[in-house]
Image (tube, helix red, strand yellow):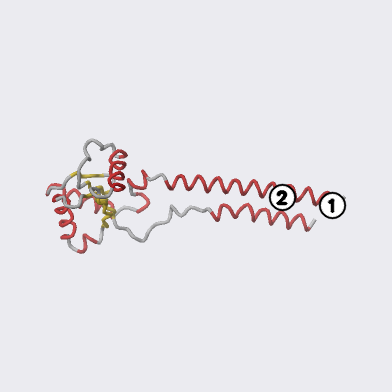
């Protein structure tokens, strides 16, 4: 009877292992509370240079509220494709055909004028005040790699559980036959 208790305890532990090994880290909150500014630009684009210069000219307190994720699209095909995917996901493929294409949270701007400056800063400040988990992030939305990875690890976990249960059944069968 003691053998059966130890076997059941061992099996219970084996069933827990797949879920602890493949635990998701997605829900972890980054200590970096800065708003993300996606900046699709072209090397040599005068409007892009103007936007970049404006971002750099902001005071240090304002700069501490955001980080720029820069994508050069004129000479980098992968970045150009990413910009098209982002525009399509935002249903802006007709209007977001040029650079700079600036995205902060759920708002975007194509081109750059003085009129955009206050709007961009307002959106940065809004995001900075929000919980990181509640923010909308277009790149997390369109990248399907996480979902594919999750489903493959789920499949592996289920397969491991099936193998453990099958092994347990076989072990019990062999133990009963050896007793008789």
In this rendering, position of residue 23 left or right of residue 2: left
Residue nearest the viewer, comparing 83 with 123:
83
Measured as percent of width and height from the top left, residue 80 is found at: 27, 45
The number of callouts visible is 2
Chain-order first, disc 2 or disc 1: 2
SS state under label 2:
helix
Instruction: Tell me what residue is drawn at x 23 percent, y 35 percent.
Output: 94
Marks 2 and 1: CB-CB under 8 Å? no
Going by the image, does 91 lie left or right of 25? left
Image position, residue 88 (x, y; %): 30, 38
Q: Which residue is mark 1?
A: 178
Q: Give the Cα separation between the discs numbered 2 and 1.
A: 15 Å
Q: Residue at x 45, y 45 (%)?
A: 147
Q: Residues within 10 Å of mark 1 (few under 14, many from 20)?
A: few
In this view, which residue lies farthest toward the left?
114
- The residue that disc 2 covers is 168
Q: Secondary structure at mark 1?
A: helix
x, y percent for residue 127: 28, 52
Residue 180 screen position, x and y as percent: 87, 50
| Left or right position of 15 against 23 | right
- Indicate which disc residue 139 carries: none
Residue shown at the point (26%, 54%) measured from the top left: 70
Extreme-right residue of the structure? 180
Q: Quadrant of the N terminus?
A: bottom right
Disc 2 crowd rating (10 Å Cα; few below 14, some 14-19, many 20+) is some
């Amino acid at each position: 009877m003691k053998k059966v208790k130890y076997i059941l305890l061992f099996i219970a532990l084996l069933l827990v292992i797949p879920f602890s090994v493949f635990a998701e880290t997605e829900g972890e909150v980054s200590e970096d509370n800065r708003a993300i500014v996606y900046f699709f630009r072209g090397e040599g684009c005068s409007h892009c240079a103007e936007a970049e210069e404006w971002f750099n000219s902001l005071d240090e307190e304002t700069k501490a509220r955001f980080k720029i994720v820069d994508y050069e699209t004129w000479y980098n095909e992968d970045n150009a494709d990413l910009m098209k995917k982002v525009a399509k996901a935002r249903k802006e493929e007709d209007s977001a055909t040029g650079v700079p294409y600036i995205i902060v949270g759920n708002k975007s701007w194509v081109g750059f004028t003085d009129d955009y400056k206050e709007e961009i800063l307002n959106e940065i400040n809004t995001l900075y005040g929000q919980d990181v988990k509640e923010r909308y992030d277009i790149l997390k939305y369109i990248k399907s790699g996480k979902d594919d990875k999750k489903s493959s690890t789920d499949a592996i976990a289920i397969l491991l559980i099936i193998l453990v249960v099958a092994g347990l059944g076989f072990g019990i069968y062999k133990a009963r036959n050896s007793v008789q």
